[in-house]
Image: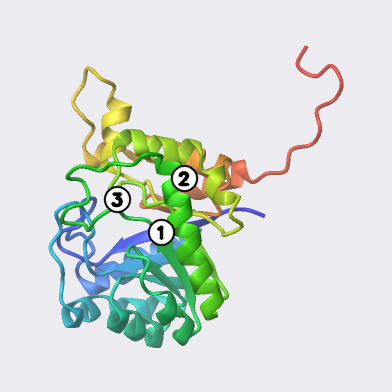
Amino acid sequence: MLAQVMGVLNVTPDSFSDGGRWFDHRAAIAHGLDMAAQGADVVDVGGESTRPGARPVDEMEECRRVVPVVEALARRVRVSVDTSKPGVAKAAVAAGATLLNDVTATLGAVAADLGVGWVAMHMQGSPATMQACPSYADVVLEVRDYLEERAGAARAAGVAEVWIDPGIGFGKTPAHNLALLRHLRVLVDTGFPVLVGASRKSFLGRVAAGPAEPALGVGDRREASLAAATVALVNGAAMVRAHDVAPTVQAARIVGQPVAPAARGAGR
C-alpha cells in the first residue's frame, strides 16, 4: 500500500516557511486545490503558526482563518485541521474536516466525540519554549512511549483512526531529529500509523549545507526535504507532510513499488 502525502496549507501571516503567502482565503483555497491536483491525499489547513517562538492566536481569529478554507476544500479533497483548540476543531469538522492534526496531543477525547481521525504529535515544551534547550536520555524511546500512551488512550476512548507523529523539529536538536528519522521503525512497530513532517525544517538547512557553510534558507531546502521524506517512507512512515507535494508524491510512489525477488546471479 502506498504511503500518503499530506499537503501543508498555512493560512497564517507568520509561518516559518511561507508566512502570509496563503493568508488570503482565495489564495489558500486555490493552493489547496492545486496540491490536491498534484496528488495530495490530505490537505492540512492551519491557522496558527507553531514555529519556534510563535505567538498564540485566539480561537475566534483561528476559526476565521481556517473554516472558510476547510469548507471550500472539503468538497474536493480530504481535509485535516492543524489545531490544538477544541473550539477550532469542532468548527472545522462541522465545515468538513475529518482529521485533527494536534501538535499538543491533547484532543483525543474531542476526536472521539466528533467521530473523526486524530494525529497525536510529540512536542517537548511549547512553540514559545521548545527550542530553548531540548534534552532527552533516549529521544527515540521517550517519544515512542509518550505517543504510544496518548494513542492508546485515544483508541480506548473510541477514536477509530489514530496516527502518531514524532514531532520533528518540535523540541528537538538536529541530532534528535536525525535519530528519529533513522530509527522510525521503533515507532512503526507500535502498530499505529506514523506521520512524519520534516518539510523545510531548519535542521535540514543546517545539515544539508555542511559544517563549513551557512545554513540553507527556507527556499533552498526542497531537496533536503525530499530526502528526509524519502528516509521516512523507507523506514515505514504511512504518511509524510510536505510543502512540495508533486515531488513528494513521486517519491512515495517509487518507495511503495513492490520489489520482485532478484534473479540468481543478478548484478554480477
* Location of residue 191 in the rendering, given as x and y in whole percent from the top left corner: 61, 57
Q: Position of residue 26 (x, y in %)?
A: 26, 73
- Which of label 3 and label 1 is nearer to you? 3
Dot 1 or dot 2, earlier in sequence: 1
Nearest the viewer among 162 and 132 is 132
Give residue 38's position: percent from left, percent from top. Answer: 47, 57
Q: Is residue 115 above or below residue 23?
A: below
Residue lying farthest top? 268
**From the viewer's perspective, is the residue at label 2 or at label 3 nearer?**
2
Q: Residue at x 87, y 21 (%)?
A: 264
Q: Is residue 40 at all visible to an observer of this figure?
A: no
Q: Report which residue position mark 2 lands on.
A: 141
Q: Quadrant of residue 14?
A: bottom left
* Residue picked out by circle 3: 170
The single residue placed furthest to the right in the displayed view is 264
Identify the element where label 2 is drawn: helix
Name the kind of residue labelled 2 in the image.
Leu
Q: CA distance from mark 2 to mark 3?
A: 16 Å
Find the distance from the CA under tag 1 to the CA under tag 2: 28 Å
In this view, the residue farthest toward the front is 137
Does residue 2 appear to the left or right of 140 in the view shown?
right
- Residue highlighted by disc 1: 7
Q: Is residue 219 visible?
A: yes
Residue at x 24%, y 55% (from the top left corner): 125
From this view, report whether residue 170 is shown above or below residue 48. Answer: above
Residue drawn where x is 45% and y is 86% of the image: 113
Tag of residue 220: none
Q: Residues within 10 Å of mark 2 (few under 14, many from 20)?
A: some
User: Amino acid type of disc 1?
Assistant: Gly
